[in-house]
Amino acid sequence: MNTSAQEILKIHFGYETFRKGQEELISHILKKEDCLGIMPTGAGKSICYQVPAMLLDGITLVISPLISLMKDQVDSLNEIGIPATYLNSSLSERDYIQTIENIFHRIYKIVYVSPEKLLSDSFIQLITNFPISMVAVDEAHCVSRWGHDFRPSFCEIASVIAKLIPRPIVTAFTATATERVKEDIIQVLQLEHPFTLTTGFNRSNLYFSVQSPENKKEYLLSFLKQHPHTSGIIYCSTRKIVEELFTFLEGHSFSVCKYHAGMSEQQREEAQNAFVYDRQEIMIATNAFGMGIDKSNVHYVVHYNMPKDLESYYQEAGRAGRDGDKAECVLLFHRSDIVMNKFLIEQSCSKENAKKEYQKLNEIIDYCNTNKCLRKYILEYFGENPDFENCHFCSNCNSEVQVTDITIDCQKILSCIKRMRERFGAGMVTDVLKGANTSKIKELQFQTLSTYGIMKEYSKDTIRDLISFLIAEGYIKSNESKYPTLSLTPLANTVLFEHKEVFIKKKIEKIVKPEKKSEKAQDSMDYDTELFEILRNLRREISNEAHIPPFIVFTDVTLKQMASFYPTTEESMLHISGVGDVKFEKYGTVFLQAIKDYIETKGKDRM
Ligand code: ADP
């Protein structure tokens, strides 16, 4: 690797080694090639353009749709001694003119700009005769109508680049990896023979878990008690549930804030800041919260309700553990969530879209019902082919499994569906198996079927759970519509006619979650929690004074390393991940002093 890139990483960012994919992308950029980097959230895309920006001659323009993030990104860069600024609609006219003047005087190496500002005549005029060495497009999936955040203004970026002489290197980054989006990015941004790198979707530091507790509130209370003094997000499907949970958790003295579209802009901003600046620990929110939030120390994301599809789920859950620390993503599943989502689809979708939405809904229901490794399920959903059966780091892999033979029950259900001519949904099939006495059943003469009432000793919930399981395992197909009908798959025939046995595995999650030995799961590090708290408070003071979020001063991972290795000299402090020369100069002495004081009060021998 280019040693200078390594030096920038160490001196400015304070990191010893590049993460997967970073090094390769950077070396291609430094060879002046266009690049397309597809990496999941938290993988470290920014460094891929920030490091080469420091090594290329002119200025790097970073085009990003996330205006609310720009200030934090620029603050972070300035904190580590990289001259950067931003141009977007949030600037006053005076600041805008000043910034343009500074750009003209080549004060910055990196300029973040919104696509709207990039397209403005005055800006185009400024940059046409200016040494722009690279244009990096962040969130590049916004160019694609197939992506989830299409922005028409992104389609104009290429026409601006075409005006720049010489043509700068063009790089694009996204976490969305479908083929269509990829092709659109290359075509719409007119990337020239781009070096394309996909690191895969896996977020190895995230522990995935699906739970179906009898009482979600009770579960949540016990979960939160096990995660004291850490930041987390609880997503709910409606504003009403957000309000209800907020009152409930506040009543139990948890440090909570809330966020949903029914609040005023000011209330939302206050809540967001309270969370980002670590003044409140738990954010309870609808999916309106999160886009444009870069808080790196979110230690868990709980979905109190099942979201509408796996894309939304992975994106929201992915807001945990951006700093590489071990984090938990829990989905609380109850059948009523299905009803709620169907209602939402009906409310908001056209007929053509509804079909697609139902299909996606069924896929996330399957995720909640499967006994397979959850990580593998997600990765396969996104088109990957993981080379493992079990990740050993999700609630399914971490469960004691009680195996029960359900072949007979399975045969009863499949045979009932067949006798009902595969034209009815789970509710009706359940009623027939249960032997319900409804007018609909009488009207259709289903009481005469041999399967009528053959599962009467089971509760309706149990029968529904078994049907869901058989759908998830591929014995039953549920078509995608508002009222899905059940039909049998070829696999069902193996049970009905070829003596195939079916087993259900009841999961009992082990209380103690295993430690993941991975580069990213840095929480497996033992650290002194008392010292960590002292350092956290010190960080909070600095952050309040400087008006920058605490994680920009130092991430939790960096503080945990300090609380693990007790650095007391400049040299040892510079070995801590996240402490580069620039940050050391700013904060090194105060943190060193805090550690020395702590050691002194505790007595050296006990360290
Ligand atoms: P993305 O844009 O892909 O979501 P970021 O660029 O925001 O991710 O990076 C996520 C976090 O990972 C940041 O806190 C960043 O400083 C950290 N990070 C990036 N690269 C490295 C590295 N090589 N070593 C350690 N931490 C890194």
Image (tube, grey):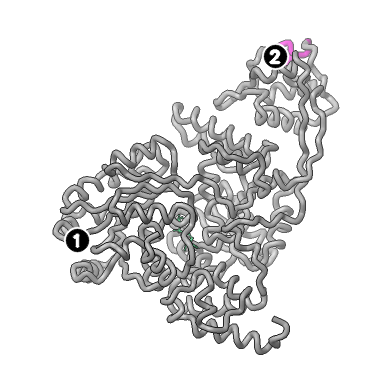
- Residue identifier under label 2: 418
- Residue identifier under label 1: 131
Quadrant holding the N terminus? bottom left
Q: Quadrant of residue 518?
A: bottom right
Which of 392 and 438 lies nearest the eye of the viewer?
392
Can you tell which mark lies on residue 590?
Answer: none
Which residue is at 68% across, 57% downward? 515
Which residue is at 80% across, 27% downward? 406
524 shown above or below 506: below
User: Residue 519's x, y, as percent?
Assistant: 57, 58
Dominant secondary structure (helix, strand or loop) of the stretch shown in magenta: helix
Which of 312 and 75 lies nearest the eye of the viewer?
75
Q: Amino acid at mark 2?
A: Lys
Instruction: Point out the stretch of residues depicted in magenta.
Output: 440-448
For the residue labelled by badge 1, is the local secondary structure a helix, a strand or a loop?
loop
Which residue is at 50% across, 72% downward? 554
Q: Is residue 513 magenta?
A: no
Q: Is residue 404 visible?
A: yes
User: Residue 405's x, y, as percent?
Assistant: 82, 29
Which residue is at 77% across, 33% downward? 504
Classed neighbour count for the residue bearing mark 1: other residues with Cα under 10 Å, few (<14), some (14–19), many (≥20): some
Q: Is residue 94 visible?
A: no
Q: From the viewer's perspective, is 69 left or right of 504?
A: left
User: Residue 350's x, y, as percent?
Assistant: 44, 30
